[in-house]
Amino acid sequence: MSRCFNPDLFIAGLPIETTSAELAEIFAGINIEMDFAELMRNRSMGRERMKTAIAFLRLKDKTKAEAAIDLLNGAERDGCKIVVRKYTPKPKATFRSPAHPWNAHYAGETETEAGQ
């Protein structure tokens, strides 16, 4: 996902064949206009795992995000139950050096030994 893309919604459980145009049709059916969509499919996994896709959406009217969640979350699409949630970015991972006192157990030390 590009750094400048700020999605409003996260959608999971979409049929793997879903296109951006089909996604726009789904939202047009509930009178919500998409600004941008990014669909993701994992083609490197085995066939048995390639049943669904995920999407990140930016809406033209951000106030309609809750309405989209209420109307589409749990809906069926081509035999797949879709999940629609408000997008929340994952927290950035922090790296702690093994020498840090909180990580004393990595070196086999106790906290008091590491703090000295």
Image (spheres, helix red, strand yellow):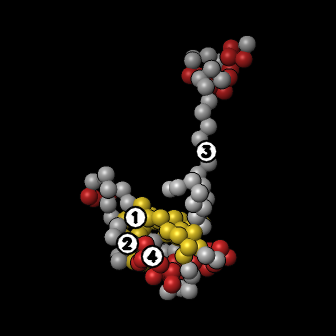
Instruction: Please say if the residues under marks 2 and 4 sit with CB atoms less than 8 Å apart.
Output: yes
Ranked by sequence position, the earlier of labels 4 and 3 is 4
Q: Which mark's residue is nearer the viewer, 4 or 1?
A: 4
Estimate the x, y position of residue 94 in percent, counting from the top left. 62, 37
- The quadrant in which residue 86 appears is bottom right
Residue drawn at the location 57% of the way across and 77% of the way down: 68
- The quadrant in which residue 33 appears is bottom right
Ranked by sequence position, the earlier of labels 4 and 1 is 4
Q: Is residue 10 above or below residue 31?
A: above
Identify the amino acid type marked 1.
Answer: Ala
Residue 85 appears anywhere in the view? no
What distance separates the C-alpha of mark 3 from that of mark 1? 24 Å
The residue where tag 4 is placed is 23
Ranked by sequence position, the earlier of labels 3 and 1 is 1
Ranked by sequence position, the earlier of labels 2 and 4 is 2
What distance separates the C-alpha of mark 4 from that of mark 3? 29 Å
Identify the amino acid type marked 3.
Answer: Lys
- The quadrant in which residue 62 appears is bottom right
The residue where tag 3 is placed is 92
What distance separates the C-alpha of mark 2 from that of mark 1? 8 Å
Instruction: Please say if the residues under marks 3 and 1 sit with CB atoms less than 8 Å apart.
Output: no
Direction from residue 52 to residue 103 in the image, left or right: right
The residue where tag 1 is placed is 53
Residue drawn at the location 35% of the way across and 77% of the way down: 78
Task: Point out which mark residue 11 bears.
Answer: none
Residue 3 appears anywhere in the view? yes
The residue where tag 2 is placed is 18
- Mark 3 residue crowding within 10 angstroms, few (<14) / some (14–19) / many (20+): few
Direction from residue 70 to residue 81 in the image, left or right: left
What distance separates the C-alpha of mark 3 from that of mark 2? 30 Å
